[in-house]
Amino acid sequence: MPPAPTLESAAVVLPCEQLAPSLEFFEELGFQLEMIAPADEPTVAQLSGYGVRIRLDCSATGAPGTLRLTSSAPERARELKAPNGTHIQITAETRLEVPPLSPSFVLSRLSEARWVEGRAGMRYRDLAPDRQGGRYIASHIQIRDAGPVPDYVHHHQIRFQAIYVQRGWVEVVYESHGDPIVMRQGDCVLQPPHIRHRVLSCSAGLEVVEIACPAAHPTFRDHELSLPTAACDREFAGQRFVHHVASQGTWQATDWGEARDTDLARASAGLVDVRALRHIPTDQVQSHDGELCLFFVSAGSARLACAGHGRPALSEGDSVMIPAGLPYAFFEPSADFELLRIASPATLKVHPHPRMERPQ
């Protein structure tokens, strides 16, 4: 087999008994003729359209195949059959679907983690296996080895996506943001829908926490765009890329304790809020009114009192999802206890909840 660089083009071969009716059919579908041969009595025709090249060939053998086309007009969805027998599936353009929320309490312990191999050498730990009904996916991601990451320019069809560095550093390049950036422990980014990006390199033992909505979403590779691109101020589906640098952040008193705001609430137009928390009140039973409230223990340890779920001990790397209205409180914290809190929507509020007995 010759090496790939010597290859110049590709076409899907579709057998046909008579060229003329099949050629007319595909031209009516919007394909454009590129080549036909021989001139006096054609038996081969090559056409292209919608990102694919097809070759109608009267001498070819085999199944007529299936061709899938997408349309931005749902009413055009239908199935056709070409004169040569090829099945044509015209389907509606894939649109982002966000399933309804199915809230649940989820406790994930690092000591019980099940890691799976994902894209580009990344190891994934699922922090919410039930995906809250498919509405959210939360992942703890590791890359063991230092050096270049075998990634490529890609983008995601999502409602929102946020990434927080738990340990180590990672070099990433983003569309419309200029030179690559290095994210270090405590740094966070909002990746707006369809922003092109690529992971370039990382430290050994890199760990990040990632949250995205919805849980099931496609990732597209971009073969055309080369990164980096020039920096410019732009929006992606009403959101803006933001890189929060932990070393430049400030701590402020809030209802949750001292919080370091990552500015993701503003950048995401209120869809998600990501904050680091410390000095968390331990004598306060409270609940929240949001869709999603994920706590990830980024340092230290504590115990969690949660109505109906006992008083589990939490250590670094553990996480818990707490549904709206469920009373909870943290107590017996270590001196270095620190939490990452991810909330959606960003307007999530906490409420005192005196009906549950305070932890002793």
Image: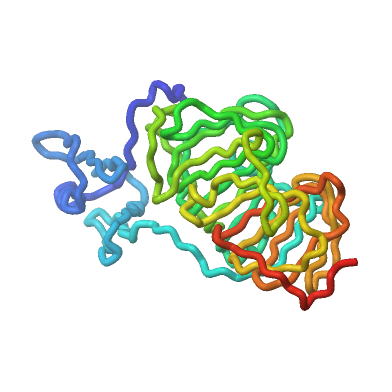
For residue 313, say whether it is visible: yes
At x 28%, y 42%, the residue is: 54
State which quadrant residue 68 falls in.
Answer: bottom left
At x 82%, y 66%, the residue is: 305
Q: Identify whether 239 is placed above or below 121.
A: below
> The C terminus is located in which quarter?
bottom right
- x%, y% of residue 226? 41, 28
- x%, y% of residue 71? 29, 57
- Nearer to the camera, 245 or 88: 245
- Whether residue 125 sits left or right of residue 329 in the image: it is left
Q: Identify whether 185 is placed above or below 214.
A: above
For residue 59, say whether it is visible: no
At x 54%, y 38%, the residue is: 243
- x%, y% of residue 11? 32, 38
Give the mark count: 0
- Whether residue 356 sits left or right of residue 181 in the image: it is right
State which quadrant residue 87 falls in.
Answer: bottom left
- x%, y% of residue 153? 47, 34
- Nearer to the camera, 61 or 181: 181
- Whether residue 220 sits left or right of residue 33 in the image: it is right
- Nearer to the camera, 298 or 43: 298
Chosen colour scheme: rainbow
- Whether residue 91 sits left or right of residue 120 in the image: it is left
- Nearer to the camera, 323 or 74: 323
